[in-house]
Image (cartoon, rainbow, N blue to C red):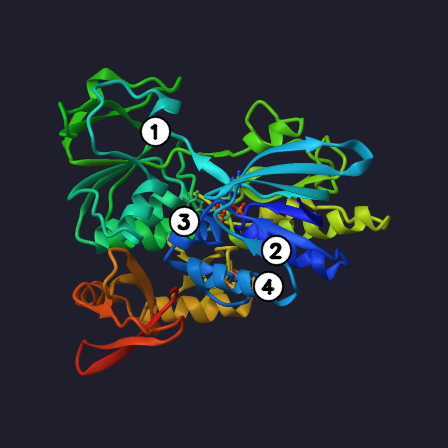
Amino acid sequence: MRKCDVLVIGGGPGGLAAACAARKAGAEKVIVLERDKKAGGILNQCIHDGFGLIRYKQALTGPEYADRAIHEALEVGAEILVSRHVSSIRDNGPDGFTVSVYTKDGIEEYRTKSIVLATGCRERTRGNISIPGSRPAGVYTAGVAQNLVNVRNVMIGKRVVILGSGDIGLIMARRLTLEGAKVLAIAEIMAQPTGLARNIEQCVYEFGIPLYVRTTVSKIIGHRKLEAVELSDLDDKGNPIPETARLIECDALVLSVGLIPENEVAQTAGVHIMPNNTVDTDRYLQTSVKGVFSCGNSRHVMDLADYVSEQGEMAGRNAAHLIRGEEMETWDEEKTNCMKKGFPDEGTITCTICPNGCQVKWDEKTDIFTGNKCLRGRKFAVQERTAPMRTITTTVKSAGGRELLPVRSEGAVGRDYVRQIVNSLKDVTAGSDLHIGDEVCRIAYGDGKECGIKLTAE
Ligand SMILES: Cc1cc2nc3c(=O)[nH]c(=O)nc-3n(C[C@H](O)[C@H](O)[C@H](O)COP(=O)(O)OP(=O)(O)OC[C@H]3O[C@@H](n4cnc5c(N)ncnc54)[C@H](O)[C@@H]3O)c2cc1C
Ligand code: SF4
């Protein structure tokens, strides 16, 4: 049996930040247990950029963010053990906890003084929302679609409908479009999209994808494979209006209808779980079981990885403070609510430099900009009006492997060249001896321009 001071369950951004912070706060032996074969959590399949704007003041891709978090934890001496599925926690009172873990070689046990739960969340499925109709192949959750398209090189369909306008669905709408699919509709039951304004702007409007609010998929049609979905407008009570029903022929339906905190392991420790599966913690992020802390999406689903990391840090520090008999720190629940969600305001430009997503308005007569909380927003709005630029994030084939590798452009390129460059990269295979940050190739585009393409994960 191995012993430690703080045991972190889950190696996503929350768990990695918790481990790093626990070590820095004086916990001597800190171990992270991750069930996947690689730490990093869901970030490993999020190849787009925009992560780390708050924490690292840079727009990183998901794999780049994960890589930094892994290195930070390792550098301070935390141990990260992968391919370890935690199955249960036994509370031994003053003697701490015994944690049972499945590995490919059998069961391991760990004895720890405190625990940080960072097990993330899972997606709501068709079963959770009960869409009427048949049960053909071709219905995916957004995260599964993201994994298939971004990692496994499996294109899910050519004509796609997306149900739900959360950020993962919006980001997949852009990704599928760039991969050559036609996204025919995004249907949202609420009166406003639920994703960030920046994603509505850059993933939906920019690609001309129709977004219908107060609308749902009222029927799924298809014998073995999906053939069509029926869309219907909703009345004031949220019921489909039969006269508005229309058929859309499609071969893939992507569900982006919410996330559920994953807390089966927490339950084995007797942690109090709320009816919506979130974890009931105090302001120190400690659960109903003394010595067990919770952070990130397993505690309460959060919009940004940056905030997950910040919360993970506090949970890790408090776990260390508790066993050292020190005063714990309090989490400010309000700090994560500053971002602009839903439709962008009319006639504005959504600033995407930081997650606030300020709605910047330009008065042509006076040349005055309003709505930007800082000067960077003005500069961004001027650039957007004159020559919008985008960083390209996509994938290339890996040498000899069936999986894809994520890449990004060295800098931003003119928005109008994005499709051309992504298409050129479909024929590129990365060399087998490349590491993160290495150049995979150079792509010529436009009128004699060229940009370097770099690997963002190995
Ligand atoms: C499909 C999807 C796409 C997303 N896209 C974005 C995005 O583009 N931008 C953004 O900012 N946020 C995005 N998010 C939100 C995202 O969840 C957070 O940004 C962040 O990754 C959450 O971190 P976490 O550490 O709480 O959970 P996760 O990243 O989910 O990590 C949890 C880890 O715990 C492990 N685990 C779970 N149970 C066990 C167990 N029993 N034993 C051992 N290990 C276990 C899992 O394997 C996983 O690695 C996305 C979420 C999902 C589900
Ligand atoms: S204007 Fe400033 S605060 Fe607002 S989104 Fe842009 S960078 Fe962020």
Q: Where is mark 1, residue-wise?
A: 214
> Are circles 3 and 4 on residues that touch, CB within 8 Å?
no
| Label 1, label 2: how far apart the Cα atoms are | 39 Å
| Whole-percent x, y for residue 380 in the image | 43, 68
| Label 4, label 2: how far apart the Cα atoms are | 11 Å
Q: Which mark is residue 74?
A: 4
> Are circles 1 and 2 on residues that touch, CB within 8 Å?
no
Residue at disc 4, secondary structure: helix
> Are circles 1 and 4 on residues that touch, CB within 8 Å?
no
Displayed quadrant of residue 229:
top left
Whether residue 150 appears in this view of the structure is yes
Number of residues whose C-alpha sits closer than 10 Å to that of mark 4, classed few (under 14), some (14–19) or many (20 or more): some
Residue type beneath disc 3: Pro
> Residue lying farthest bottom?
448
Q: Is residue 217 above or below residue 353?
A: above
Whether residue 308 appears in this view of the structure is no
Q: Nearer the viewer, residue 446 or 287?
A: 287
Q: In the rendered structure, which disc, 1 or 4, sits on the residue that comes first in sequence?
A: 4
Question: Seen in the image, is 298 located left or right of residue 41?
Answer: right
The residue sitting at 36% across, 37% down in the picture is 256
| Label 3, label 4: how far apart the Cα atoms are | 41 Å
| Whole-percent x, y for residue 318 in the image | 75, 48
| Label 1, label 3: how far apart the Cα atoms are | 17 Å
Q: Where is mark 2, residue-wise?
A: 17
| Whole-percent x, y for residue 330 in the image | 75, 46
The residue sitting at 64% across, 38% down in the picture is 99
Number of residues whose C-alpha sits closer than 10 Å to that of mark 2, classed few (under 14), some (14–19) or many (20 or more): many
| Whole-percent x, y for residue 304 in the image | 51, 50
Q: Nearer the viewer, mark 1 or mark 2?
A: 2
Q: In the rendered structure, which disc, 3 or 4, sits on the residue that comes first in sequence?
A: 4
